[in-house]
Image: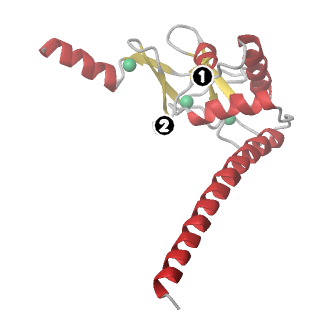
Amino acid sequence: MQPGCIKTDRRTNVLIFLYLCRDENKQSEKTMETNDLADSLELKGVKPTANRILVLKALKVQTRPLSLTDLEDILATMDKSSIFRVLTLFLEHDIVHSFEDGRGILNYELCTSKTVCNQSDAHIHFYCESCRKSFCMDDIPFPAFELKQGFTMHSVSFVIKGECPECSRKHKDNQHG
Ligand SMILES: [Zn+2]
Ligand SMILES: [Zn+2]
Ligand SMILES: [Zn+2]
């Protein structure tokens, strides 16, 4: 009996076991994520296709609203018209909402409600005129308003233009340097 040998063997086995587990986890995480994305499309009445899942994933990964051009850069394997078709379908089914940024260019972001959307997730956006990025100001309460009689709201957008913290900092650094 050589205890040293057993110890080494056991450690090797554990290492192999851990390695296999890690690999399996990675695989199931990936499948689970794709399944989740597919489910969220189906909940809104859209058949999940590879392209639709790709666009949904891109919007989910980013923390800010994206324009068609932004999406085109991220989804290098998809052409502009395919991305646009998916976005149009997503808009029809309230999977995404769009708003015009400070340049009058449409920005897209995911709807936060899982099923039917009543536009309660509408929020203020900030457009940085220096880096041309849009930011969600979803923790600032939307100003309350009432429409004139006879008018029905379908969507609402509120965009504040200015400079984001990063660009402000760059400006200040330039002034001092
Ligand atoms: Zn919504
Ligand atoms: Zn900026
Ligand atoms: Zn937003």
- Crowding around mark 1 (Cα neighbors within 10 Å: few <14, some 14 to 19, many 20+) is few
- Which quadrant of the figure has residue 42? top right
Q: Is residue 144 left or right of residue 47?
A: left
Q: Is residue 129 above or below residue 34?
A: above
Ligand 1 appears in which quadrant? top right
Query: Which is nearer the eye, 3 or 58?
Result: 3
Residue kind at label 2, given as amino acid type: Pro
Query: Which is nearer the eye, 85 or 101?
Result: 85
Mark 2 or mark 1: name the one nearer the start of the chain: 1
Q: Measuring 35% from the left and 18% from the top, which residue is drawn there? A: 163
Q: Measuring 28% from the left and 20% from the top, which residue is drawn there? A: 168
- Crowding around mark 2 (Cα neighbors within 10 Å: few <14, some 14 to 19, many 20+) is few
Q: Which residue is mark 1?
A: 74
- Which quadrant of the figure has residue 37? top right
Q: Is residue 161 above or below residue 119?
A: above
Q: Measuring 65% from the left and 19% from the top, which residue is drawn there? A: 76
What's the mark number on residue 141? 2
Residue 50 pos. (x, y %): 79, 31
Residue kind at label 1, given as amino acid type: Ile
Q: Disc 2 and disc 1: Cα gap in Å? A: 31 Å
- Which quadrant of the figure has residue 173? top left
Marks 2 & 1, CB-CB < 8 Å contact? no
Query: Which is nearer the eye, 52 or 90?
Result: 52
Q: Measuring 70% from the left and 54% from the top, which residue is drawn there? A: 28
Residue 135 pos. (x, y %): 47, 27
Camera sees residue 73: yes
Q: Is residue 70 above or below residue 111?
A: above
What's the mark number on residue 63? none
